[in-house]
Image (cartoon, helix red, strand yellow):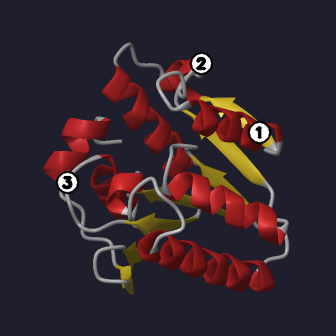
Amino acid sequence: MRVMVTGHRPPKIGGYRTPNPTEQWVRTMLHKILEGMLRKDPKLVAVSGMALGADTIFVEECLALGIPFIAAVPFEEQDNRWPGESQKHYRDLLTKAKKVVYVDQVASYHSDHFAGKMNERNRWMVEHSEQAIAVWDGTKGGTGNTVNLLQYKERKVLRLNPSTFETSVMEPEPDEDLVGEMFGGD
């Protein structure tokens, strides 16, 4: 089974200074969830978009548990505007991936626009995973769009809300207009 993550960048999970209470809660919850999934399926594989924040924490917890992961990178040099330490950590994580997919290089997922590249990366992850975890506070944006696509694809989503420190299972209830607008209604 494959499980993907979608989630917020550091500003919405406590900031760039770590550890902090929100980041620690997200990390602890991801660890517990992945640990439980691994007990149920020892062949579990994870999928991450490799962005700063929830994606990176997810990968770190996969590595701590020995879960192989696929890095679904939207385009080469995704990290070129990140701080030096973040770039170094990101590149180190990429070397530990079971597989690195540069989604922009997959013809059916190609886009010429930055936001389009991120949307296509998210679509690739949804289409290559059976389960999903969303570190999402309910706001609009890339994570919200991906949650909506997951629901459109009739997937349950395990949601970790970093604003309230609550977890929930989201049943499929997509906004079909938004899916069409962001992902072409696939």
Numbered badge on residue 12: none
Q: Amino acid at mark 1?
A: Asp
Q: Amino acid at mark 2?
A: Gln
The CA distance from mark 1 to mark 3 is: 31 Å
Q: Amino acid at mark 3?
A: Lys
Rendered image quadrant of residue 19: bottom right
The residue identified by callout 2 is 105
Q: Horizontal placement of 142 versus 155: left or right? A: left
Q: Horizontal placement of 7 versus 125: left or right? A: left
Q: Is residue 105 above or below residue 128?
A: above
Say which of 122 and 108 sits in front: 122
Q: Could you say whether the residue bearing mark 1 is in a helix, strand or loop? A: helix
The residue identified by callout 1 is 92
Marks 1 and 2, the one that precedes in the sequence: 1
Say which of 102 and 182 sits in front: 102
Q: Horizontal placement of 154 versus 107: left or right? A: left
Q: Could you say where residue 68 lies in the image, as x and y percent from the top left?
A: 81, 57
- Closer to the observer: label 2 or label 3? 3
Numbered badge on residue 140: 3
Q: Could you say whether the residue bearing mark 2 is in a helix, strand or loop? A: helix
The CA distance from mark 1 to mark 2 is: 21 Å
Furthest-left residue in this view: 177
Confirm or deny contact between disc 2 and disc 3 (CB under 8 A).
no
Crowding at mark 3 (Cα within 10 Å: few <14, some 14-19, many 20+): few
Residue 1 showing in the rendered view: no
Furthest-top residue in this view: 112
Marks 2 and 3, the one that precedes in the sequence: 2
Residue 60 showing in the rendered view: yes
Q: Is residue 131 above or below residue 93?
A: below
